[in-house]
């Protein structure tokens, strides 16, 4: 394996490396955010090595996967809603979800736009072929509070259209620490597609109440969902005007310990695979309104996205002892035929 450390001064527009059909170009957005453009023979992706190690954009086999939000470029901020255009974000840390009135944490915790102190590219090959992998280290420390290290590793294979992700959160402080994680994968909706995930459509699905700003069309959509939980599996068009659908499911693992969810239409299929033993809650999020088209059909998480206080009440918090680590793996992307 060959490793290339990354430094901010490398991000003038330049080719960094080639590895078989894989090429990596460094550039900087006009907003000042450093980025990597990776082409692998199946598509093109854009990674942000120092800002949350997000996947800002992804296109495979000529089909763009990334949600539409109006953000043309990432913004240099930790404010979640001021740079909300990425295909994939890490969420969590010491909190997760929408903060309730009794919470004091940022939306979706510390991880989404967390600055990375180190980042590196790794080029190698295994039984699945040649690959490029982005890794790095981000650290958070609060005086008289928690401290943790976040270490993700995101791998993309030559001519492959699935990301392979490993994450690690380590408690580097001296006291027990609450730990949360959610993989926020933001696909664009495929109108007429069908969602599948292995869970039966019963009324145990946890549903957040409709948004106060939802239109009459959206309220009608929610009413149909209340009558038949399977209604949400048929991806509607933008005329539904659903501002923020949030469901939480709990599909079981297969014999191999993995579970899988899909958005499929004809020869096109989006997929997310995860380990329910690590991430027992599957959040499903949809937003269809002017300037915003998103289908987060599978956001595997340690807790429901209702804020830290709610997770504490519901017993959905992972507690890490000093030096203890939370680890998990995921796969996400497309499997078009």
Image (tube, rainbow, N blue to C red):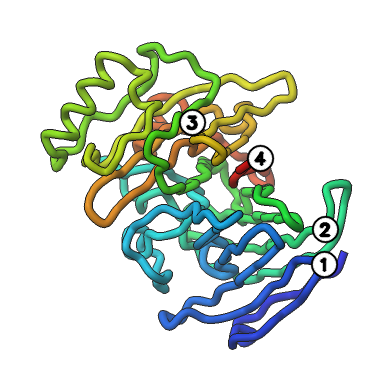
Please, what secondary structure does the residue beneath circle 3 have?
strand
For the view shown, which residue lies furthest in the left direction? 216
Discs 3/1, front: 1
Please, what secondary structure does the residue beneath circle 1 have?
loop
Mark 1–mark 2 Cα distance, whole angstroms, equals 7 Å
Residue at 43% x, 41% y is 296
Mark 2–mark 4 Cα distance, whole angstroms, equals 23 Å
Name the residue beneath numbered marker 4. Answer: 328
Looking at the image, which is closer to me, 242 or 77? Answer: 242
Name the residue beneath numbered marker 1. Answer: 20
Residue at 37% x, 58% y is 80
Above or below, 70 against 202 in this view is below
The C terminus: image quadrant: top right
Mark 2–mark 3 Cα distance, whole angstroms, equals 31 Å
Instruction: Tell me if label 1 and label 2 are in contact, CB under 8 Å.
Output: yes
Q: Earlier in the sequence, mark 4 or mark 3?
A: 3
Name the residue beneath numbered marker 3. Answer: 282
Q: Where is residue 188 in the image (x, y as percent from the top left)?
A: 42, 48
Mark 4–mark 1 Cα distance, whole angstroms, equals 29 Å
Name the residue beneath numbered marker 2. Answer: 130
Mark 4–mark 3 Cα distance, whole angstroms, equals 14 Å
Mark 3–mark 1 Cα distance, whole angstroms, equals 36 Å
Residue at 73% x, 60% y is 133
Above or below, 44 against 8 in this view is above
């Amino acid at each position: 394996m060959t490793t290339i450390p990354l430094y901010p001064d490398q991000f003038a527009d330049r080719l960094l490396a080639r590895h078989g059909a894989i090429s990596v170009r460094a550039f900087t957005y006009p907003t000042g955010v450093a980025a990597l453009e990776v082409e692998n023979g199946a598509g093109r992706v854009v990674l942000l090595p120092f800002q949350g190690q997000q996947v800002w954009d992804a296109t495979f086999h000529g089909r763009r996967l990334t949600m539409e939000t109006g953000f043309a470029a990432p913004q240099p901020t930790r404010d979640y809603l001021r740079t909300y255009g990425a295909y994939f974000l890490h969420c969590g840390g010491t909190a997760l979800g929408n903060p309730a009135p009794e919470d004091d944490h940022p939306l979706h915790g510390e991880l989404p736009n967390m600055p990375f102190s180190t980042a590196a590219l790794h080029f190698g090959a295994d039984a699945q072929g040649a690959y490029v992998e982005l890794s790095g280290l981000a650290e958070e420390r609060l005086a008289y509070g928690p401290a943790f290290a976040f270490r993700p590793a995101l791998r993309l294979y030559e001519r492959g259209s699935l990301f392979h992700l490993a994450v690690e959160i380590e408690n580097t402080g001296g006291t027990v620490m609450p730990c949360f994680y959610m993989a926020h994968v933001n696909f664009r909706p495929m109108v007429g597609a069908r969602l599948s995930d292995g869970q039966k459509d019963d009324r145990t699905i946890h549903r957040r109440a409709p948004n106060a700003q939802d239109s009459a069309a959206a309220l009608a959509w929610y009413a149909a969902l209340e009558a038949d939980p399977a209604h949400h599996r048929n991806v509607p068009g933008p005329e539904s005007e659903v501002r923020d659908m949030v469901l939480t499911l709990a599909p079981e693992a297969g014999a191999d310990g993995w579970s899988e969810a899909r958005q499929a239409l004809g020869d096109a299929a989006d997929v997310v695979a995860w380990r329910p033993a690590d991430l027992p809650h599957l959040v499903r999020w949809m937003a269809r309104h002017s300037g915003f088209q998103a289908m987060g059909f599978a956001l595997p998480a340690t807790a429901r996205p209702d804020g830290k206080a709610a997770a504490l009440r519901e017993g959905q918090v992972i507690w890490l002892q000093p030096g203890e680590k939370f680890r998990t793996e995921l796969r996400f992307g497309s499997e078009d035929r």
